Image: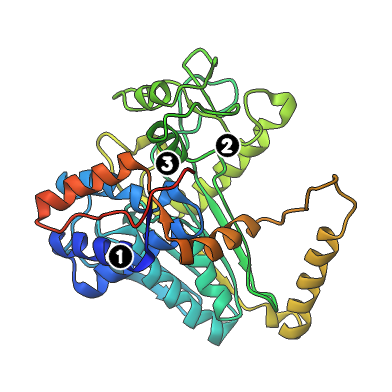
Amino acid sequence: MRVTVSKAKRFVEKIYDGYGFSRKDSALIATTLVDADLRGITSHGVQRLSMYDRKIRAKYIIPYNKWTVLNQTKTSVLVDANQTMGQLVSVFTMDHIISKAQRHGIAVGVVRDSNHFGAAGYYVRMAAKKGLIGIASTNTNPLLVPPRAGQPFLGSNPLAFAFPTKTGAFVFDAATSTVSLGKIEVLLKRNRQVPGQWAINGDREQLNDPQTILDELSRSHRIGGILPLGGLNEANSNYKGFGNALIVECLTSILAQGSLSADLGNKNHDISHFFLALDPALFGNLDKLESSLSQMLARIRRLAHLPEESIRIPGDREIQNYEKNRTAGIAVAEKTLNEINEIADRLGVSKLTPSNKVRE
């Protein structure tokens, strides 16, 4: 089903108004979630309303709480989110370090005691719009099973990067696991099987049924889980994906002095984030640097390639989806629509209705 962008934003704003968030904060949350759907990242769009609803009702997310700046220098800031929505404290922190980087060339922000912050790419694009390089990452609940292990320890631990160019930012945003948990949830809602080597059970046997994967990860003592980039076997370099996830854990929970991914989920709910903003003009003329990157990407696109195929740069799919969806409306699975309308009923908000039905 498709829903117009304006209708989706108004609906999400009213949902968060109903929880007790300010109108400004509700509008920002709605913008970040719908932005993910616009880019085709449905795992981090309005389908996340159900997860956030559970966290708000369990008081893991507290609408009235405000973050606190614990420590800062000319080029750094440490923030305690105080259990507010991850999107809100993340936008604040990225804005804060962008200002510092514009004055001093570089700045780093670390956040602790936060919550799921949505799609990491949103924050790095904030930096790129100001002519800066942006990096963002977060730890998550334990999902990733290390090579040779049978239970998860690290999160999906995404890493996003953006560099400004003449035609818009080059953006890379991806989990360090083969896939995020949200993509498994989307497959289940669409009655589809996992198409690749994404997940295993406790005996390191490949799983392709999304319900089984989610059931394994919903146990109090999780078994099996999502594989690191590289999949099941070390021959495919899964230790590199594992290493990337470990780096993100160092930058987030370790620097923030928060809970490790392994300790999140049952008793602890303090997710940590990392943000960096860097002025490329420290190293040369910004126009020349942006042109150099644009030219490099153009050269890659012109490489010899398979017939009737085009070479796709990271971020191309999101750009194409954005152009399509801002006109056609965002795609929402029927099960997602039912879930979020149940929340709307409880909060006394008018239901979200599709603009049209499509086959996706």
Residue 88: in sight, yes or no?
A: no
Residue 301 in which image quadrant: bottom right
- The label nearer to you, 3 versus 2, is 3
Label 1 and label 2: CA atoms lie apart by 33 Å
Q: Provide the secondary structure element on which disc 3 rests.
A: helix
Residue for point 42% across, 29% down? 191
Circle 2: residue type: Thr
On the image, the x and y values in percent for residue 31 come to 36, 67
Amino acid type at mark 1: Lys
Looking at the image, the residue that sits furthest to the top is: 203
Q: In this view, does 206 lie to the left or right of 10?
A: right
Q: Earlier in the sequence, mark 1 or mark 2?
A: 1
Q: In the rendered image, which quarter is residue 20 located in?
A: bottom left
Which image quadrant for residue 291?
A: bottom right
Circle 1 SS class: helix
Q: How crowded is mark 2: few (under 14 residues within 10 Å), some or many (20 or more)?
A: many
Q: Position of residue 281 (x, y in %)?
A: 69, 83
* 201 shown above or below 52: above
Camera-side mark, 1 or 3 = 1
**10 Å crowding of disc 3: few (<14), some (14-19), many (20+):** some
Q: Which residue is drawn at 50% across and 33% down?
A: 144
Q: Name the residue under label 3.
A: 182
Residue 211 lies left or right of residue 67; in this view the side is right
Q: Name the residue under label 1.
A: 7
Q: Earlier in the sequence, mark 1 or mark 3?
A: 1
Q: Which residue is drawn at 49% across and 19% down?
A: 150
Q: Residues within 10 Å of mark 1 (few under 14, many from 20)?
A: some
Q: Is mark 2 on a helix, strand or loop?
A: loop
Q: Mark 2 points at which residue?
A: 178
